[in-house]
Amino acid sequence: MTVSERVQMPTRFNRLGAPALTAVFAVLILLISACSSPEEKDDSAGGPIQVNTSMGQVTIDGTPERIVTLGTQWTDVALAFGVTPVAYLDNVELLTKEPTPWVGERLASSQSVDPARDVASQVASVDPQLILSTNFGEQQETYEKLSKLAPTIPSITGQQVDPWEDMVTFMGTVLRQPDKAKEIIDGVHAKVDQIKQDHPGLNGKTFSLAYMFTNDQIQVFGDPNDGAATLFSSLGMAMAPSLLETFKKNGEPRFPISTENVPLMNSDLLVVTANSPQMRGALESLPGYKNLTSVKDKAVSWLSVAEISGINQPSPLSLPYVLDKITPAFDAAAK
């Protein structure tokens, strides 16, 4: 006799979820049902898991070993479980032309998928048992090709970028390792809590996030509920007042400003990146930049494009790494 168990996944975590700088496809929330025999005390026995997605119902039989991850977050989540994908597509690596610093050489034995070529044929060559496909979840033609190769899962929430906690929980269910999933999530949350404990002075301080992507345009964040902003909100910080006010007027969570409007970024902490060293130099030379409170107090964290992506496409690997990079600026801002 078979018993159906509902596996509850958190649908929202206010602490560390984040939308990405690059577009990621959104789909409907998944409902996960796991079926197992009452005699099966160990989930590793591998009863089928049925997943209802916007692309139809997907059944995962057994515990997949040959997993393909088409997206930075899924790749990091797999590695956090000690699983090396047989093939992967890393958005950040494609952008920067090198592995992310928190992954290093851990994907050296894995096949990199080139999105400029036929994705399905590349995936087919590694004989997958499960495909986690954030990038191609809503490209009907590609999805259909992938789903013929192995069970294919698109995004797992209705958000622009899946909260990493949800992804870890899902992976723990698929791998029959729920305790490992909890351990991974608790470990990252503990790191955030430790930073908050070590920096009580951050409470009530303001922050701004910025990305200089052309010589005269800077992308900034104004929505305090933006996923990238919630990391700092969890530390008791508030969005830079001028950026918040601009967001309330234009309704755009992220918006470009010209270089003469750099004073809008005035805050106690600035986390910033630029597309090139030349652009960084141009920003640092602006009078408006030099007069920012964060600059005067040395509470500026310059991140690489990969590192800022680690906030915008958060994972259990990227967040601890990036938090360590920002800590010196936290120290200065907390004074």
Image: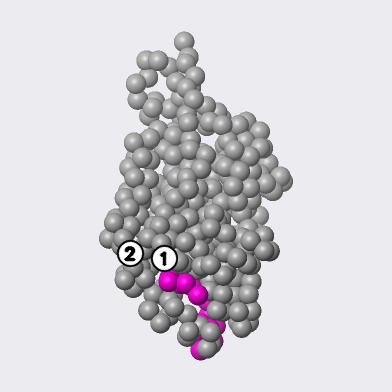
Q: Are marks 1 and 2 in contact (CB under 8 Å)?
A: yes
What is the three-letter code of the residue carrying label 1?
Lys
> Would residue 26 be visible to someone looking at this image?
yes
Residue placed at 68% from the left, 41% from the top? 144
Is 100 left, or right, of 152 in this rendering? left
Position above or below: 169 against 104: above
Q: Nearer the viewer, residue 135 or 144?
A: 135
- Image coordinates for residue 9, horizontal then vertical, percent: 48, 35
The residue at which mark 1 appears reads as 205
- Image coordinates for residue 283, horizontal then vertical, percent: 53, 83
* Mark 1 surroundings: few (<14), some (14-19) or many (≥20) residues within 10 A: some
- Image coordinates for residue 32, horizontal then vertical, percent: 53, 31
What is the three-letter code of the residue carrying label 2?
Gly
Q: Quadrant of residue 226?
A: bottom right
Residue placed at 40% from the left, 57% from the top? 236
- Image coordinates for residue 196, horizontal then vertical, percent: 33, 57
Is 153 left, or right, of 8 in this rendering? right
Q: For the view shown, which residue lies furthest in the left direction?
A: 198
Q: Whole-Å distance between the Cαs marked 1 and 2?
A: 8 Å
Find the magenta span and give its range: 266-285
Residue 201 numbered mark, or none: 2
